Image (cartoon, rainbow, N blue to C red):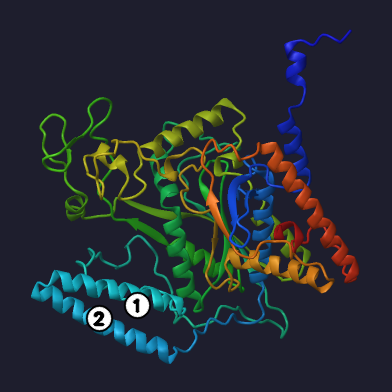
Amino acid sequence: MSEYLTRADRMRKLAALDVARAVAEEHGVCVRPLAKERLDLDTGRVEIIPVLCGSTVASVCPTCAEKNRRLRMAQCREGWHLADEPDFTPDTPTGEQKELTAYRADLVKAYRTALEEGDETGAEEVREEIGDVDAELRGMGVRGALPSVEPRPKLARKRSTRRRQDAPNLPRRPVAKRTLGRVYGGKYRPSTFLTLTLDSYGKVRSDGTPVDPARYDYRRAARDAVHFAALLDRFVQNLRRCVGWEVQYFSTVEPQRRLAPHWHAAVRGSISRAELRAVAEATYHQVWWPNHDEIVYSGDRLPVWNLHVRGFVDPDTRTALPTWQEALDQVERPAHVARFGVQVHSKGILGGTPEAGRHIGYLTKYLTKSISECYAATTTRQEEHADRLCAELAVTPCSPQCPVWLLYGVQPRGARQSMTPGVCKGKAHKRSTLGVAGRRVLVSRKWSGKSLADHKHDRRTFVRQLLADVGITQDDQPKRVVWNNVQPGDPNVPPRQHMLLRAVAERRRWKAEYTAALLASAQPPPGEHDSSATSLAA
């Protein structure tokens, strides 16, 4: 006689998907693969292939998040203590590129002449020819923005660049075309680990919550978080002008206990603490937006869309709200000024030392978590503090196109009927970001001379070359393929646990081949802290 199981007993038994997910995590396989259709153009065979989800958050996919973190660690390590200047010298233009560019200039002149003469048909034909020439130039390797065929738009509104009277003067030197720091003692080239924080908004306890929530400046905290990325750009610009060379950095943005974002940066080269403090004190970012201190519309009284004026109007008087440009014309002073706080921490680091490795790990420690996950509210007071900040972020405009502007009686730029007053889908208003709408990792362009995709390609190339050296090739893979998205409900898509187990089998085969290649080439297997190869190549 079989044993009787209650509903609770049956629910405690593992589902097949849970077991498959656990096996996938153990073998370093993506647990949320995306089903893609692969068509082999040579044989006509169609297969459903699981593709990595690429998530950077461990709560979504721990495997992909850890791969991304280790890749970022390698990126940081490769560029922090460079000894040779990266070469960014552009190639010399070829004769074909110059001839095609000259031909494009003639076409642009012909296009504008046709417009002046009213020949719209001829102008359209010339415009299509210009598009073909642009595509051909791109194929030749020409990058950057090509001159527009249309007349120049109206110049943007200019603001005074004079420094504020309440900000100290910033020393300025000519910026040399170099990215490396100084060498000391003929052989030491130290770099810098830097941490910047925002200004204070009121006294806080050890758990990050305000001592007096009624006097804590949540409005300024929300605005500083929204404009934090712009403030960082201004700081780097001022720092380069101060030290006199193109400072390069690898940095991450994380929340403090009080929920204000702060900046950790690995800076190439040695910079004195006095200079860093002076630049941080003198750096500010002015937000030249319309005033948004008082909410004009709320509750059921919200602006409505009017088809006749093609814009939002007052719900009572039916008067059109001022457009974005009209509101900017009335701006006489910045709506907000963001500044750093007095806490500026810096430390000199030598490359190749255990201390450098520890700081790289510290930089990338929280990259597998979202901003809100880095802050784990354990008390009611902390939850209330986060709720009040999120409530203020909900009514803080995040961009000129933000529908929140309608609450302040201003039409956002590009206003349209589909907008809901006060409801914005931007990342800055989400609880998971706490106002930090930009990227978590900020890397200067000349850090390592490579993008993240370049680092991934280098790792794949390394593994494939290692396998090829010992005679292991991927000849069974199709050469010419086309990838297509699958439609929802496609019966050909296997269940997720089937895709997970297929990916596990492939992973085990790749790992066996790689281990065999390492043994054949007499190379030691990668250690725990070695981010050089295999776990990221797959």
The answer to whether residue 302 is left or right of residue 286 is left
* Image x and y of residue 304, in percent: 20, 34
Q: CA distance from mark 1 to mark 2?
A: 9 Å
Label number found at residue 149: none
Residue at (78, 64) in percent of width and height: 354
The answer to whether residue 30 is left or right of residue 504 is left
Dot 1: element: helix
Residue 425 showing in the rendered view? yes
Q: Which residue is mark 2?
A: 107
Crowding at mark 2 (Cα within 10 Å: few <14, some 14-19, many 20+): some
Residue at (31, 40) in percent of width and height: 404
Q: From the viewer's perspective, is residue 329 above or below residue 395?
A: below
The answer to whether residue 450 is left or right of residue 133 is right
Residue 209 quadrant: top right
Q: Which residue is mark 1?
A: 133
Dot 2: element: helix
Q: Nearer the viewer, residue 316 or 240?
A: 316
Quadrant for the C terminus, please.
bottom right
